[in-house]
Image (tube, coloured by chain):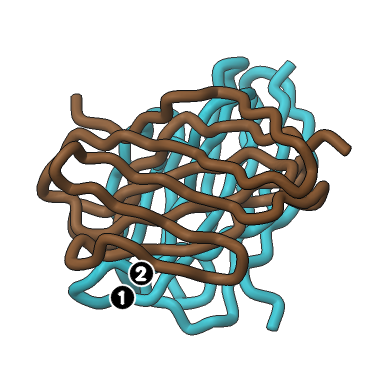
Amino acid sequence: GESVGLHLPTLSVQEGDNSIINCAYSNSASDYFIWYKQESGKGPQFIIDIRSNMDKRQGQRVTVLLNKTVKHLSLQIAATQPGDSAVYFCAENRAAGNKLTFGGGTRVLVKP
Amino acid sequence: NAGVTQTPKFRILKIGQSMTLQCTQDMNHNYMYWYRQDPGMGLKLIYYSVGAGITDKGEVPNGYNVSRSTTEDFPLRLELAAPSQTSVYFCASSYSGPEGQPQHFGDGTRLSIL
């Protein structure tokens, strides 16, 4: 079936460097995408979202890029900090009821 | 605001027992959801509700039941617990509307079936 997936299960990054987390989706009808951060023992926390009529959206230290041609989504974290260590999930919305389909997650480890 | 509150945080059940996982939200969201998350995996939708009195199945509904008598509460019922239901359960809520909206999550209930 159609799904949202991630290329890299684990990403190690030096503190202060930029992080890039990638996500592929297969349904061209998807019109809304979200990135979540999940820390150990916590629920997913909303980071940033983007709609299909946009290519790029920026937040505080985070940027989401959407390439609809190749069905690819990425999350860029600038100046990665120890507090950014977590699992990051992308999710897509393509169904009534605001239902989300989640990818498998990428663990980001920040090295001091 | 408390957001989405789930109780209990932890629970151990014996095979065949039943229990209700509680979820309440104070954001006046119409939409509510239940997910399960197995170790090292993403979230899978169990059930969802688009308003009081309306519920529908998600991807993995077998072994679970839900009800939605009020806007605030969306309890998840496990009948005849099985080891395969050992997981972390997350409740979420969101605004309704024609366009996508972010879902807001509780901190989960960690359930072990022994």
Residue A51 image position (x, y, % from top left): 26, 65
Q: Are marks 2 and 1 in contact (CB under 8 Å)?
A: yes
**Which quadrant: the C terminus of chain A?**
top right
Task: Provide the chain ID for the residue under circle 1.
Answer: B
Q: Amino acid at mark 1?
A: Ser
Visual hue assigned to chain A: brown
Q: Which residue is mark 2?
A: B101
Q: Nearer the viewer, residue B3 or A44?
A: A44
Residue bearing mark 1: B96
Q: Nearer the viewer, residue A89 or B3?
A: A89
Q: Secondary structure at mark 2?
A: loop
In the rendered image, residue B89, in percent from the top left (x then y), is placed at: 60, 42
At x 24%, y 48%, the residue is A67
- Separation of disc 2 and disc 1 at Cα? 7 Å
Which quarter of the figure has residue B113? top right
The answer to whether marks 2 and 1 sit on the same chain is yes
Dividing the image into 4 quarters, which one contains the N terminus of chain A?
top left
Q: Residue A24, image x and y in percent?
A: 31, 34
Q: For the residue labelled by badge 1, is the local secondary structure a helix, a strand or a loop?
A: loop
User: Dot 2 falls on which chain?
Assistant: B
- Residue B62 shown left or right of residue B86 in the figure: left
Q: Position of residue B104 (x, y in %)?
A: 53, 65
Amino acid type, label 2: Gln
Name the residue rendered at 18%, 37% in the picture.
A70
In this view, which residue lies farthest toward the front? A17
Crowd band around label 1 with a 10 angstrom C-alpha radius: few (<14), some (14–19), many (20+)? some
> Height in image: A48 above or below A106?
below
A47 sits to left or right of A65: right
User: Mark 2 or mark 1, which is nearer to you?
Assistant: 2
Instruction: Report whether B86 appears left or right of A56.
Output: right
Q: Of the numbered discs in the image, which one, if any, rests on residue A46?
A: none
Q: Give chain B's shade.
A: cyan
